[in-house]
Amino acid sequence: MDLESIPGVGEKTARALAELDDPERALRAGDVAAIAAAPGISQGRAARIARGAIRRDHDDPGGFLATDRAREIYREVLALLEERTVTDYAAQRLETIYPSPTRSRIEEVRAFAAEALEREPDPAVLEALEGLEPLREPGDVRVRERCLATTDAERYSEAREAIPELSVEVVEDAQGLAELARGYSTVIALDESFAGVTVEGDVQVRPDALENPAEVVPERPLAFFARNRDRLGAAVAVHRAADMDAACDLSALENGLSRLAEDGTVAGDDELDRLTTAVDDLDAAASAAESVANDRLREAIREQDVTIEGSDLLSLVERGAGVDSLLSRELADEYAAAVEAARDHLVDALDLDQGESEIARRAFGDEPTFPVERDEDAIGRLREELTAAKERRAGRLKRELAADLADQREGARQLVRDALELDVELAIARFARDFGCTMPEFVPAAEARGTGFAIEGGRSPLLDEPLEAIDPVDYAVSGVALLSGVNSGGKTSTLDLVASVVVLAHMGLPVPAESVRLRRFDDLHYHAKTQGTLDAGAFEATVREFADLAQGGEGSLVLVDELESITEPGASAKIIAGILEALSENGATAVFVSHLAGEIREMAGFDVTVDGIEAVGLVDGELEVNRSPVKDHLARSTPELIVEKLADEARDEAVAANGGAPNDGDPEPVFYDRLLEKFD
């Protein structure tokens, strides 16, 4: 794969991506976490790179969201999806799902979404997901107690590259090997020529070591599992809670992780724990043993009455004898008992086996001294013996555990990926349930021209209301239409609903409606309501934008909210009528919300459809509205409804004042009726 062919990826980023284990898989899958593991690439940047790779693979030209308001709609519906994720990964992964005009990309996501809708957002699964995170690379692993040895310079370079975790040393002969063995717990000789050579220390001749690095450096695979123990454990919990098929043996993985400590050492082995504790506690135990001997000896001296005749004392002094000679002569048994107690304490405190005990007992000699002191050479030998035994056992256990876990590494990676993807699926499922969504139906390409959209039972997800409080909307448009209606009647909300449905459909996701049928649009142009009249420059820019759109409008969906606010009402009606004519001729689908629908219809050079969001009336000063636009109907305005209400009230008051009989001469009803006639 040519990484630099991905939109937005230059030479530097391509080099960073190339350091990933499998960049092609990560890019194809939109695996934001894996991409973000490349040096210098953030999560947000990873999502953009993934989108670029997807666009390249599907030959997607981009630019579907053609206006600021269209992009806002996308960000708002995306935020609703991301709110329903548990993990940060799922939120970033959703960033790779974007509205596209390309059929292959839409179908790819639709297949994923269809499976997602089968998921049940079980609270136990959501709780298990809370502990889940993407896997981390273990970083550099260095092992200092082992080394590789060779006599060949070329082999030296090969070894450094194959097993960077170990030091590699060049030796000339067996003597050099012996010197290395004094400085390292284990020396691994790579040359066949060393076979049969006897060297003191742990020296292994392994000509095949470079072909089997995990056996030589089990820390390499173990570091991966150690650093990701909690993440892997969480992935196992997710699979169990969701009853998912696993990419590896969950019980075997759990068993292996239970034997692995966070620092990459083997856990749960009693013998290794004993040796580790003995090495760590050796100095303290030796000091305590000294204290045991000296305390017993002091007590013996206090209780012992020692009598020395003058001639004997003179003889001892002449020979230069000191307290040691006195101890040997007068307290020999007590000294022997004190030393034996020190030896027993050292053996018991360190829980030493028979062979280790023999070395430990040499730490306290039979020759009387006071105070009793340990023999540092003997303690040093004991330390070497314990350390070597610990390293041998740790090495063997690491190799065994690494062998058990090594084959599960890729399965463990897939286990976490599947659990993280489940969070993405559940977010889609939760969104669909929360907003009553269904999968939309796209008309075949052969039927697309002249087809727009048809929404039944749509509820805008952008309204800040509970779903049950939102009135369902039915609306269908083929070609160009004007949408009229009273203020606060829901015209803008209807445009938002249409935009949300179209954006989600082109993302390949379920839409908030009972059913939706639409064509595959090339782009979405949504122009929000302009605040105030535009100055000349802004007005000119707006007109230019529509001129460009009119040149190639076929395949576009154009949603415009009260474009008349850009200039004077009379001029606005003429401009909008001209824009609609051009869009209609080019086969675009368009909905223009306008309070000038009647005027625009009169000025348009074709029979433009006018739909209306009809207000049923005023109840206690509040509008009662049929939120679904009525086809081919110019909706009444709020002022008309208010005048009608005033006329009805005035007529009722006149009748009441006339004793229940109509009074056609009353001036107020006549005035209101005259105003109502102006709306006809």
Image (cartoon, rainbow, N blue to C red):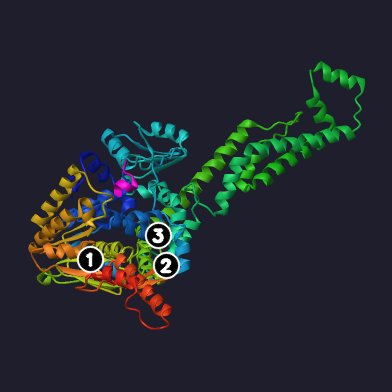
Mark 1 to mark 2: distance in Å? 26 Å
Label 2 Cα neighbours within 10 Å, binned few <14 / some 14-19 / many ≥20: few
User: Which disc, if any, is residue 85?
Assistant: 3
* Amino acid at the residue labelled 2: Pro
User: Which residue was labeled with disc 2?
Assistant: 466
Residue 597: x, y in percent?
A: 20, 64
Residue at point 47% right, 39% down? 185
User: Which residue was labeled with disc 1?
Assistant: 483
Magenta-highlighted residues:
40-46
- Whether residue 146 appears in magenta in the rendering, the answer is no
Q: Is residue 323 above or below residue 418?
A: above
* Amino acid at the residue labelled 1: Leu
Q: Earlier in the sequence, mark 1 or mark 2?
A: 2
User: Which disc, if any, is residue 140?
Assistant: none
Q: Is residue 104 left or right of residue 628?
A: left
Q: Is residue 411 above or below residue 332?
A: below
**Res 446 seen here:** yes
